[in-house]
Amino acid sequence: MDTPVHTLPKEERLSCRKDISDLLAHGTFCDAPGQLRFCYRKGTGSGLNRIMVSVPKKHFRRAVKRNLLKRRIRESYRKQKHLLDGTGTDILFIYSGKEIMDYAGIYSGIGTIIRKINGNERR
């Protein structure tokens, strides 16, 4: 039974104010195809890959729509997090589009982001 564990416990969510400010100050911002942006920082020393999701209120005034997009992004990451090389990476996903993307589009965007993070590590 070598199946990857598809869970997203609280320890894998970025919530500490100091860690978030470190990510924003020292992280690398990149664009992904579609309507996603991301910021990541490797080698945080936490021993876990942690994520944070942001959907701006500027584009989606209704909390229902923001929460829908955040759920889709978290679920896409949860199913693909085993593809991320190494541990100790903090990632901030930012939804930058003005239209609601379907789950398949978000899923492929998150996969692209994970591949970009892995590719930048080998350089």
Image (cartoon, rainbow, N blue to C red):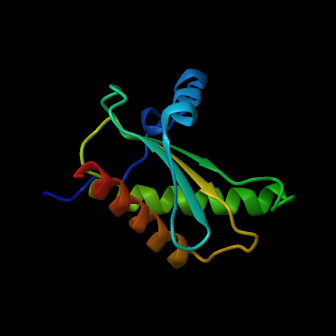
Residue reaching furthest front?
123
User: How far from the left and from the top, in percent, is residue 43?
Assistant: 32, 32
The residue closer to the viewer here, 90 or 8, is 90
Tell me the quadrant of the picture where the N terminus can be found: bottom left
Residue reaching furthest right?
61
What residue do we see at 42% from left, 55% from top?
A: 78
User: How far from the left and from the top, in percent, is residue 79?
Assistant: 38, 61
What residue do we see at 62% from left, 69% from top?
A: 35
Q: Is residue 34 above or below residue 120?
A: below
| Lateral position of residue 22 relative to residue 69, left or right | left
User: How far from the left and from the top, in percent, is residue 22?
Assistant: 53, 27
Q: Is residue 107 above or below residue 37?
A: below
| Lateral position of residue 85 relative to residue 78, left or right | left
What residue do we see at 24% from left, 56% from top?
A: 4
The number of numbered discs placed on residues in the rendered structure image is 0
What residue do we see at 49% from left, 60% from top?
A: 75
Q: Is residue 118 above or below residue 45?
A: below
| Lateral position of residue 92 relative to residue 77, left or right | right
The residue closer to the viewer here, 122 or 86, is 122
| Lateral position of residue 81 relative to residue 1, left or right | right
Residue reaching furthest left?
1
